[in-house]
Image: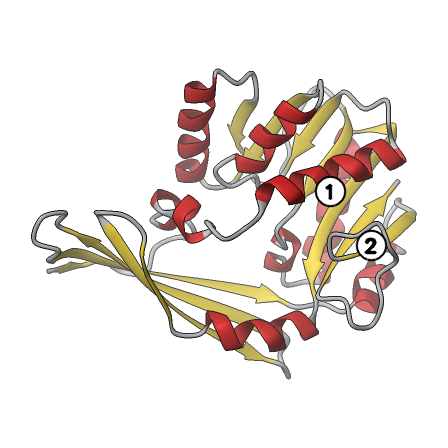
């Protein structure tokens, strides 16, 4: 068995990402983002998604409305999978490999959005402030910036069902996940052991390990940082509702202008 060293985030996971995320209701989530766009910037046409993964949400959003969508992710492997899906679906979405802390666009957008707690991968205030600067530069003057983040309450609940998760995702892969939350440090770590298997014998051919560390923020911490940017808070929503976030929110969606 050939064991590889720890891989860069999502380099191997990209191959099975859609299977790992199979329980996520992307249709409902996409409807929610579309509802926010219609509520706060109804004339939007040009949309940019950051940290798009394998493109599932961008592809779903394209089907909902007449948007012109560009979607980016820092992982070339994720973008490769997204482009393959787009080709099968005859999509017009432009998928590009790009770090959201170094956005390279000549055009501007009506909406920039980033979901699935991608913000939690930023561990310092400076990184979060830089993200806001980057987005401000590619956003039209009346555009909106939408992103979500998970809270400490979410991490305390999530470790009970994410820790020691095991799943066979297709004929060629299986994975095990361990999940731990260091509340004092505010760090939630998910470690994936991914095994590539022979589809006939089920023998393990290669084993990969990926570790994902997220910094978990409170609403107050995020809003304090936003005050240091050029953005104003339009709304902080609870979960997937168009209702205000509160102290028991597991996921908070920010709308900035």
The image quadrant that residue 230 belongs to is top right
Give left or right: position of 185 versus 9.
Answer: right
**Residue 255 as seen in the image, left or right of residue 92:** right
The image shows residue 51, relative to residue 207, as above or below, that is above
Residue 228's quadrant in the figure?
A: bottom right
- The numbered mark, 1 or 2, whose residue comes first in the sequence reads 1
Q: Position of residue 73 (x, y in %)?
A: 53, 38
Q: Which mark is residue 32?
A: 1
Task: Give the image location of residue 12, x and y in percent.
Answer: 33, 49
Badge nearest the viewer, 1 or 2: 1
Q: CA distance from mark 1 to mark 2?
A: 11 Å
* Horizontal side, residue 231 vs residue 19: left or right: right
Dot 1: few (<14), some (14–19), or many (≥20) neighbours within 10 Å? some
In this image, 122 relative to 18: left or right? right
Question: Mark 2 falls on what kind of element?
Answer: strand
The x, y position of residue 31, in whole percent, is 70, 38
The residue to which callout 2 is attached is 237
Along the viewing direction, whichever of 65 and 84 lies nearer the viewer: 65
Which residue sits at x=76%, y=67%?
249
**In the displayed image of the protein, which residue is found farthest to the left?**
201
Q: Is residue 228 visible?
A: no
- 189, 195: nearer the viewer: 195
């Amino acid at each position: 068995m050939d064991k590889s060293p720890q891989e860069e985030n999502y380099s191997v996971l990209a191959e099975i990402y859609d299977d790992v995320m199979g329980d996520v209701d992307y249709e409902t989530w996409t409807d929610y983002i579309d509802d926010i766009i219609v509520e706060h910037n109804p004339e939007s046409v040009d949309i940019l998604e950051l940290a798009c993964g394998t493109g599932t949400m961008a592809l779903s959003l394209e089907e909902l409305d007449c948007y012109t969508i560009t979607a980016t992710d820092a992982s070339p492997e994720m973008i490769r999978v997204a482009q393959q899906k787009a080709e099968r679906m005859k999509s017009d979405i432009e998928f590009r490999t790009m770090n959201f802390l170094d956005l390279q666009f000549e055009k501007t957008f009506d909406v920039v959005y980033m979901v699935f707690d991608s913000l939690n991968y930023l561990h310092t205030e400076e990184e979060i402030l830089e993200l806001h600067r980057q987005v401000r530069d590619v956003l039209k003057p009346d555009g909106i910036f939408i992103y979500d983040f998970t809270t400490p309450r979410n991490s305390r609940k999530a470790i009970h069902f994410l820790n020691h998760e095991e799943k066979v995702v297709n004929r060629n892969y299986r994975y095990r996940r361990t999940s731990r939350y260091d509340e004092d440090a505010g760090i939630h770590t998910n470690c994936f052991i991914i095994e590539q298997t022979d589809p006939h014998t089920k023998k393990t051919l290669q084993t990969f390990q990926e570790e994902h560390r997220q910094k978990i923020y409170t609403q107050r911490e995020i809003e304090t940082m936003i005050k240091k940017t050029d953005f104003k808070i339009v709304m902080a929503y609870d979960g997937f509702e168009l209702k205000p976030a509160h102290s028991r929110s597991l996921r908070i969606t920010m709308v900035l202008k």
